[in-house]
Every structure is written in structure tokens, then in C-alpha cells.
Image (cartoon, rainbow, N blue to C red):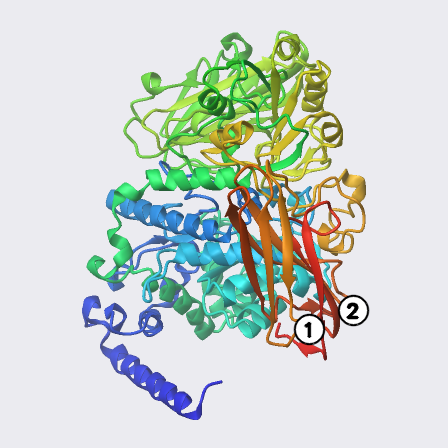
Amino acid sequence: MKTRVTRIIECIAACSVALLFASAAPTAVAQEPANLPYMNPQLSPEQRATDLVRRMTLAEKATQMQNNSAAIPRLQVPAYQWWSEALHGVINQGVTEYPEPVGLAATFDAAGIHTMAAQIGIEGRIKHVQNQREGHTGIMGGLDFWSPNLNIFRDPRWGRGQETYGEDPFLTGRMGVAYVTGLQGDDPKYYLAIATPKHFAVHSGPEPTRHFADVDVSKHDEVDTYEPAFRAAVTEGKAGSVMCAYNAINGEPACANQYLLQDQLRGKWGFQGYVVSDCDAVRDVAANHRYRPTQAQGAAISVLRGMDNECVTFTSRFGEPVEKAYIDAVQQGYLPENTLDTALIRLFTARIKLGMFDPTDMVPYAKIDEKELDSEAHRAHARKLANESMVLLKNDGVLPLKPEIKKIAVVGPLADQTRPLIGNYAGQPTHIVSVLDGLHAEFPNATITYVPGTQFLRTNGKLVPDALLTTPDGKPGLKAEYSEGRMSPGSKTTPILTRTEANVNLSESNLPKEVAGKKAYGAQWSGTLTPSESGDYQLGVRCRGFCRLTVDDKQVAAAFGGGEELSSGMGRLRLEKGIKTTISMTYGTQSNKPHAELIWNKAQTGVSPEAIAAAKSADAVIAVVGITSQLEGEEMPVSEPGFLGGDRTSIDLPQPEEDLVEAVAATGKPLAVVLMNGSALAVSWINQHANAIVEAWYPGEEGGAAVAETLSGKNNPAGRLPVTFYKGVDQLPNFEDYGMANRTYRYFTGKPLYPFGYGLSYTKFSYSDLSIPPQAVAAGQRVDVTVTNTGKLAGDEVVQLYLKFPDVKGAPRIALRGFERVHLDAGASQKMHFDLKPRDMGMVTEDGNPIIAQGEYIISVGGGQPDTGAPVATGKFHVDGQYALPE
């Protein structure tokens, strides 16, 4: 609590600053900006930001309220783009890409995530310096990174669950704090970068309804499940920013939600940073949620409730500049200008803390050696985390494969692909190791035969024949329109060249001179496709850059690849002989080596005989199967059965891959299945019939090497599931139901396929000497235990501490309250120590109040949840009296 003396000092300081600004204001126009208070590094960032904002006109202020913040030349304020992403690596070219966050969560290695985030911050700083040097101020060039995603993965059908740290609030919170503190750096004055936990707070699908859905949720579930990770990132991690979500919660849009933004975030949690909206979420307040009748009123209520910076996909909205809504809101009386000032002061405080208004030699992070970009150390850490993320789900002894193995058959559509390894929200690394490449490196003396075995998820295709294409006005070929500038989904630009081309087959050799040499450019081809044969086809795109294909105005395929990599996307559709089908392909790139193709294949079904033959002649079979971020992801069109709008309607392995695994299993050869996916798969048949199963997630640029090292035994797997693997959707409540009853391991009452926290090893561990004071106090509880590697191999163990609470309504069935990853040589032991803080001992009552409940607690410390077959040590302690915890 602040003393009276402290308050007096603060008052004097505040009054002095106010007098300084008041005296400066009348002469501000005549002074050089360099001599004004906002350019004085000796003042606090908040004082400087306040001075700067008070010198702006209303029109200038309005231009700063979106991610595309305009320059204000008279005040020497440069343009700034707030939109950058760094979920598991900076979204840019030539960067390090780590495993997708659900895989990072499987490491149970908070220290490793902290190191990763610090490396991401370094690479983000370097890219920012490079972008400034090149005059690039567009998306992905700034220092405010919209990561991490701290939403709770409550249902495996959500396509964006891959971006999260899983289903548990405690694990998500610890990973979130580790990421935020790593990314933001440890300098007392300057941020390395700013982290933006998202999407605050009750947000996890479905994707198709997110712009208008109104989620009903109890206060118990908000405080117990959806908020804790955000609270930790703000109160412990000191996150500089938070992103509000698209959907409404209990009748109020997330970006205008009084309870979330005012009562919780800025009220009880004391958040001092800025809030950015998800892209077009403020637009949704009026247009889709109908929470206010006009865009001006929607923008006004968002700012009044605590939103400070609006992400907009385009700079115009309904034909008007975005900033007009803020000018109208003030002039029409919906938004006091001083409230607008408060938002802007937060934004400029952040920019000042990033060092953007100070001399370069004052900002330590502005002088990072550019050799640290995509460095060997960063790649090594990506390999380490990929290895740590591997979860061994089953093993009857076939793994690790013996070094002297002679013949290995590899099947499955994903074994040789690299793009699926890095999941969604990913940049472009300089190299990616496929599983097949990793196996060749790890087993150099073995003969490795690879047969995909199925056309499913294969993106290789040949050019659509020229003779089948017609321009909109009936001529042979396609209408091609070339434009300067960044092309993106839905973008509309004025062509600088229009011509007819025989096909989409763009390369450096036939790039029109009108766009050659441009920093960014794009093209759109349109016309009709008339097949000469009826049937099911795979129709798609292959490009370097961004490309998208629509058929009859519906997107059927898209791809994105940076650097030197070509990326492909395919969609399945029925085409009839002689019937014209309208097609349109959009392409955009910043590469000096353009590449764009319109490709197709005749769709095939069934398992290829070559895959079965390869399995029969091998000593062991490795099946690399699963799904990809082209099937599960953010608000995306998918034409495959079992997928809808980026989400899933089934959690089974897709049937073509299931058929393939069953076919090679029927050969009787030893079978190890490698799963690649960002969400739980119901692989019951595989669990019963395969000899071994490795869950590899989307493991990043070093993922193929990590898989191979796990199969060989060089990497002793110790990853643990951060989500429950259910047996099927019949075990799940309605997807749109945000109530936590019978969801996640904390409340699920059925028997899962694999439980949260589960994972095997090539060695064994035991637990002993559990020490717990029998009577806990409100200040916390101390726990000690000894873990021993009782096997013959060195390996990591993930020590997990779970609590079972007194019988109070609202308490979870069981809850993770501590974890630590430790390495032990064969026969070695280590004493582990846990300090349970008051909040770790807490639960939330049925009516939403966090407490430490009175009564008996059962504690379990071991390699997984108790009663799941994991080795554990259990004990009890008692709490006298009930204690309230702050929200």
C-alpha cells in the first residue's frame, strides 16, 4: 500500500509535469520538435507521450488509432505499422522457426520457451532494423508482436488450437509468462519487443461464426479457465499489450467488454499497457454484433471500454477512411477527446519504450549483431525444443529402431513435405528438414524406400492444359492483370498492365517489364476452365509468395511460401465434361524470383499397391500421417470431409490415411506411426494395432531431424500431452458450448484415449520420499520428492504436481499446479522441490470467487496424472479456514 508521503511525492511530480506541458503548449508551434519535452529521454515515457499527444490535432490523433499509423511530419512522428507476428518465430523471411505452440507446450519446459522468445525478440529487432534501412514500414516490420496465443484449447475441433499451449490454464500461464518475459527483454528502460497475449479472453471457435457469435459463459468458467493465463501474463509477465477477440461474451463484444477490459484487465489486474483489437473486430461491434448502430459509435464504445488501437485489414471501411469513425465519434459527442488522448498516450508510451524516439546509441537493442539472425545457436535451440516436444504414445519395444536395420519403408503423404512442419502463423526459415531427410541422415546405412501411398494431402500437380482455358470474353487463355504493391487475400488494386496469357505459368523469364524490379507486385488471372473429361479433380496453385484460387467465387486452394521455397495448395472438386467453370487466381510476392502456376491432377482413391509392396519387403515400416494447417487453421475454406471453415467436424484420422495405415499394418511388419497435427487425433485403431506411435505435432524447421532422432533413440522422448486425446467426438459436448462441464482433463469424467500429461520414455522412473507439511498455511505449501531413473538409458522426466481439492462446488476433478523437466542419467536420482503459492492452492467457487478452500487436499507428484499408469507419489495435507484470493 502506498504511504501518504509517497502519494504527496507523486502528486508533486504529476503537478510539475502538468505545469511543464501547460507552459510548453502555447509555444509548441514555434519550437523545433527536437527541443520539445516528448523528445527528451530524461523524462518518463508517460510524460513524453502525454506531451506529444497534446500537440496533435484531432485529425492527426485519429490517424494513430489503427495499426497503419500515419506519419505526422510536423511533429517528426514517423509512420508505424503495429501489425507483426511471432507466434513461434518472426513472420518474415530468413528466420528461425520453432515448433508450433501446442508442441512447445508438450515440452513442459518453461525455461526453454523463455530462451526461444528471447531469440525471437532478437530476430525481430534485426528484421526491424533491416526494414527501416530498406524503407519498409509495412506489415511484419514492427516491434509489437501479436503473440502469444493464451486461449484455452477447450475442444479439439478448434482449428486454431495449434497456436495455443493446450487445455490447462496453469500450464498455459507458465508458458505465457515465459514467452512474454523472454520477448520483452530485461532492460530496465527499453523493450526488446512488445508481447501481445491474445485473444482476450473467452475465444476458441468455431471459426465460421467468430465475427458475430455471442458466447454465454459463467463467471466460474471465466475466472477458473479462460482468464488465469492472461492474468499471469499481465500481473507476472508485465505484458506491454493485450489483444481483444472477435466474438461477444455474455452480450458484449470482446473489444467493448466492460467486465473483461475494465473490471478485470485494467481494474483488478492493474494493466497499464495498450489493448489492440483483432483485425476488424471493432468493425464487427456495429456491423455484425449490432452492439451499436454506427461505426462511429462502435469505435467510441470500444475506446471507452479500453481498446486503444484498431487492427484493420484495409485502410478503408465501407468506402470511408478508418480514421473518420474516430473523428465522427468525437465531433458527434460519443467519445470525449480526452478519452481518445488516454488511448494515444498508451500507444506512444509503448513506442517510446521501444526506443523509437531516442538516438540509436541510447537503445541497446538497436545495436544487435545481425549475425544473430537465423544463427546456429537459434537453430540448435529449435532442434532442442523439437526433440523435447516428441511424445511417445505407445511402444511395445520396436523403438528405438536398431542401428543395424537394413531396409526401412516410409509411407504417408507428409513424410517428404516441409511446409506442414512449421504449422500456421509461421515465417520462412532458410532451411527445413523433412522427416524423410531426417531419416536418411539418421540411418545412413539403411535402404529407405519412400512411397506416399495416398493422394490425400499431396500437393504436387501438373499444369492445367492451355487448351482447356478461356478468357472471360471467350478467347483462348486467361485474362492477366498485373498490379504494383502488396497483394493479399481480398485486396483490390488498379492494374498497371492487362493482357491475355495462355496459362498461369509465371516465372522470372516471362515477368512483364512493367512490374519487373518493383519491390512488391501481384497478378490476377481470370477466365474459365472446360474439362475434356468428367470426374473428380484436385485443382490448385503452386507459387513463391502468396497465391489463392477461387472456383465459381469460392476459394478452393491457397498457398504461401517465402524465400526460395515453392508452396502448393490443392482442393478437390467435381468437374463435368464440356461445362465451363469460372476460375480466378490471385498472386502476390516480394521475391525477385516470381513463380506462379495453376496445377491439377485427376483425383485418385485407395491405397497405392507400391506402398504395400514396399512395406512387405522392409524390416520396419514408418507411416507419417496426420493433418496440416491447410486443413485446420484460421477461418479458412476446406473442401475435405471432416473439416469446416478451419475447424474439424471429426477428430478421427482422415480416412485415406487410416486406410493406408491399416493396409501396411496388414503386412505384419513392425510399424511405427508418426503423427503430425496441431490437435488431438482419435487414433484408436492405430493404438491397438501399431507397434509404436510418436506424436510429433508441427515441430518446426528441425522437426524432421527430431522425429528421426526419436525413432533411432538418440533422442529419448519425454514430451507430455498438453491436451486430452479423446476417443471421438461422441465424448465431447456441443462445440459452441463454452461451459467447461465434461471438458478437458480437469472436468472430463469419461475415459480418454490418452490423458493430459501422458507420455512414455525409453527408460523408467520412480518417485519416493514425498515430503509435505501436514498443515498448510495461507502463504503457501512446500513439497519435496525424489525422482530416480530406474532404467538403463539416460533421459528426461517431466515431473508433474497435481492437486485434488476439498469437496467444494466448483472445484475441478484434479488440477496441475507444478511441473519441472529434469534430465537424469541411468540410476541417478534428484530431489525436486516445489513451492505452492496461494494461487496455486486455489480454486474457484461455483459462483466465481477464487478461494483457498478449507479441508483435505490430496497431492500427487509424478510422471503424469495419478491413476493413469504413470509413476507417482501421493500424500495429503489440510487447510484450516477458508481464504479469499484476489480476482
Image coordinates for residue 157, horizontal then vertical, percent: 69, 41
Q: How many marks?
A: 2
Question: Closer to the camera, 105 or 645?
Answer: 105
Image coordinates for residue 503, horizontal then vertical, percent: 46, 15
Q: Which residue is mark 2?
A: 808
Q: Amino acid at mark 2?
A: Val
Q: Which residue is mark 1?
A: 851
At label 2, counting other C-alpha atoms closer than 10 Å, the crowd grade (few under 14, some 14-19, many 20 or more) is some
Question: Closer to the camera, 285 or 386?
Answer: 386
Image coordinates for residue 405, horizontal then vertical, percent: 54, 17
State the mark number for residue 515: none
Q: Quadrant of residue 57?
A: bottom left
Image coordinates for residue 525, horizontal then vertical, percent: 47, 23
Image point 44% across, 90% down: which residue? 3
At label 1, counting other C-alpha atoms closer than 10 Å, the crowd grade (few under 14, some 14-19, many 20 or more) is some
Left or right for 599, reference 741: left
Residue 502 visible, this orientation: yes
| Gap in angstroms between the C-alphas marked 2 and 1 | 10 Å
Image point 39% across, 45% down: which residue? 140
Tell me the element at label 1. strand
Q: Earlier in the sequence, mark 2 or mark 1?
A: 2
Image point 20% across, 59% down: which residue? 361
